[in-house]
Structures are given as C-alpha cells and as structure tokens.
Image (cartoon, rainbow, N blue to C red):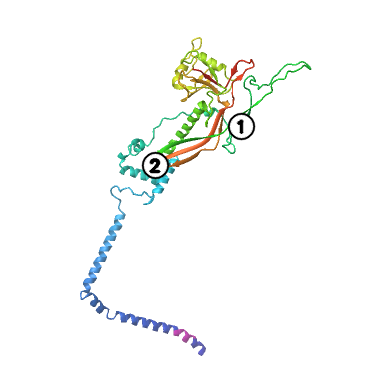
Amino acid sequence: MADEITPVVAEAVPDQRALETMTVTLKGMADKVEGLEERLKAQYGKDLKAAQEEMDAKVKTSEAKLQEAIRATGQPATGTPEPEETYGYGKDGLGDVIAEVRAAGQTSGAAPERLIKMHKGEMGRRDISTLSGGDGGFFMAPQFSSQLLQVPAGGNFLSGLCRRLPAGTPPNAPITFNAFDQTGAKGIYGGIAVYSAKEAATVTKLTTHKLLQVSLKPEKVAAYWLVTEEAQANVPQMGAMMGPLVQGAIASQRDDKIQDGTGAGEFLGYVGCGAEIDISRATASEVNYIDVVNMLARILSSGNYVFVCQRVGLLPQLMTMTDGAGHLIWATSAREGMPAPTLCGVPIFFNEISPALGSAGDLRLVNLDYYLIKPGMGVQLKSDNTNANFIAGIETIRITYYEDGKTWLTSPITLRDGTNTVSPFVSLAA
C-alpha cells in the first residue's frame, strides 16, 4: 500500500505550489485595484465622466479622418497632375540625365522611357524664346515634326573603285611593293624581247627588266563637328543622322584627294601624276564626240574604266553629243530614265569635285585598278566639352584615322611601235 500512495503525494506537491503562487499574484492585483477610483478622482478632479467622454470624442474624430483618407485613395484622380520634377532621376540625378542623353545620341536615337518622359514634360513648361532655331530651338516646340530634314548625299564614291590593301601589322607602318618597270621604251612587257635567231648566231645583248618600288605610308586624317546640348537632348534621331553624314563627308574628301591630292601628308592624286595623258580638245569650252574617241584611243588595253565628270556642266553636252553622221550617241529610255548612264559603253561617274565645263580635266577616263589605297590605324572617336565648350553648352566630336593612296605607274607606257603611249589615266585638256 505504501508503494501505491507515494507517487500520488509526489505529484500533488507541484500543484499545491502553483496554487499558492496564483493566490499571491491575485492578492497583489487586488491591492493595486483597491482605491483606484479614489486615485483617479484625485488626479482628474470630480468630473471623471466628462474626461472619459472627451477622450472618446477625440478617438472618434481620429477614426473619421482615417476612414476619409482610405476612401480618397480608392477614388480616381481629378485634373492633370503636374509632371514629376525629377522624372525618376532623383534630386541629384543630373549626371544620369547627361549620360542617357549622350547614350541616346550614340545608339541611333534609342532613348530610355524616363528620358522621353522628361523631354515631353519639360517641353510643356519651358520657355523656348531664349533659344535660337539654329541652336536647337526648332526642336523644342511640340507642334514641329520630329523628322529632321536634310539633303541626302550621293551614295557612290571613287574610293570604292580603287584597289584597297590590307592594313597589316602594325597598321601605320609603311609598306613597299615591287613592280615591273614598264615605263618608257620598255613597254608593257617590261623590256622582255622576243627575237628570231639562227643557229649559233651572235645575239646582241638587250636591256634586262627592272623593278620599281612603290611605297605607301598611312597619314593621319581627322573630321570633327559640333553638337549643342539642346540638339542632343531634343533630337532623338541625331545619332542616326550623324552616322551617314560623317561617312559621306569622309568619302567625299577621300574622292577629292584621289583626284587632286598633293602627296604631302595626304593622298597623291592621279591628276597630274607621271602616268597621266592629256588629250587636246577639238573646240574650246565644249566636249565633242571626237574628244571622246581620242580619249578612248589612249587607254591601256581594257579594264574597269569610268568617265569622271561633273553633272551640271557636262550632262547637257553628253546628252546632245552627235557622231560624224549627226546621230545622237546618247541612248536613254523615257520610261526608265537614266539609271546607269554610259558613254560609248563606258560607265559615267558623276561627282561634285570635277572641274567645270571648259576647264582642264572636265572629263577624265580612268581605271582605278591602278590606284592603291593603304589603310592604317582604325577610326578613333573622341569628344570634348571642357572650358569654352562647356560654358557655351557645345560638345566637339572628333574622329581620326590613317590612310594613304597613290598610283603605282610613274609614266605612260610606250607601245611596241616605240612612239604611241597609253595609260589608265586619260584627261581632256583645257
């Protein structure tokens, strides 16, 4: 029996202690509550009920304001809100704005959404009367079209007809070619003689063939243009526009030097080179059929020849030119117009650089397989907006590259008759 009673007594002890602890806690709480009403009256005065009502009124007022605010957030906004001042860039986001404007100009006009949003918002609030049109004011007003008008440049250039060499390593190093000396009396076969000889006959010693060396060294060429802050920020198509314009300007300048370069720090042009042949014209200030025939007679065999001339002065002469029998030699189609004009079967290359009608070289006949172009170090692009440029709000963009070009024939080639000469560069004299 003792063994069965012992566990019951052991378990009852903790329950009794817990009950005693709870009793002590409740007695303490009762002591605090006792006399509470008297203490509150002493603190707030006799009008305890009025104080309670005032507190309830403040709680109700606060709850009413909270409910009104909650209802207002669920209703649609009225009126047109003012555009956000920072447009997502933050108070100190000027650097981000500039970076995104420049990036938009370098990626064909692709601009991030927040930059477009800022542009639209600022156009509605900005006074554009302080900007002149040429400096960017034309692009500030929303009623203008976003398209930028420009005169398209010609898409064909002489440089595309030249023989282009690889840049090599290092790209700016000079390069030298060996070529057969076919000038003067050596003729097109470079002095190699073929003869009939009897058996054991004495052979007169002939001149041996020689080599010429042609060297090209790429020279520095630079192009630059100015862009205003207003143009960068308000003409999203600026980047797409500048690429073709710069490429066209470079190609046009290269064509100029292919023809008239001096060779001093630039291309050596085929005009006036040692291999050029001048043809006297029949009538001053005119180009006639006999002139064209005489030019064709002096070219070096066959090849990729083109007539090079200016359209404004020469086209009326060429289209009205007649042969010895009075027949027009220009054939055209009233339906197709003049897609690929030719003269005596040779393509005509119109450009803006050739001399005016009546001047020396107003019509030239050339084969640019005999003109070499050696590129050097590739294009490098830099920008500058420091000092005066920064104050004026203008950025200067500059690109540099290296190349050289020249003909590799040094004189006309003499035919086997020992008298007549031919050349890949024939020009009509004044």
The residue that disc 1 covers is 176
Task: Using residue 215 as the reference point, say whether residue 113 is left or right of it.
Answer: left
User: Residues at badges 1 and 2 in contact (C-beta under 8 Å)?
Assistant: no
**In the image, which disc is placed on residue 358?**
none
Q: Main secondary structure of the magenta part?
A: helix
Taking the spot 42% from the left edge, 46% from the top edge, the residue there is 99
> Could one spot residue 237 in this view of the protein?
no
Tell whether 205 sits left or right of 224. right
Residue type at mark 2 is Ala
Q: Which residue is mark 2?
A: 388
Image vertical order of residue 66 relative to residue 418, above or below:
below
Residue 38 is left or right of residue 96, and the answer is left
Question: For the image shown, how many numbered marks are present on the structure?
Answer: 2
Quarter occupied by residue 196: top right
Which amino acid is tagged 1?
Thr
Q: Position of residue 175 (x, y in %)?
A: 60, 33
Mark 1 neighbour class, 10 Å CA radius: few under 14, some 14 to 19, many 20 or more = few
Sequence-wise first label, 1 or 2: 1
**x, y percent for residue 149:** 39, 32
Residue segment shown in magenta: 7-13
Q: Is residue 287 magenta?
A: no
Residue 318, image x and y in percent? 47, 17
Furthest residue in direction right, as rendered: 200
Compared to 85, does 376 lie above or below? above
Residue 12 sits inside the magenta stretch: yes
- Looking at the rendered structure, the secondary structure element under dot 2 is helix
Q: Residue at x 51, y 90 (%)?
A: 2
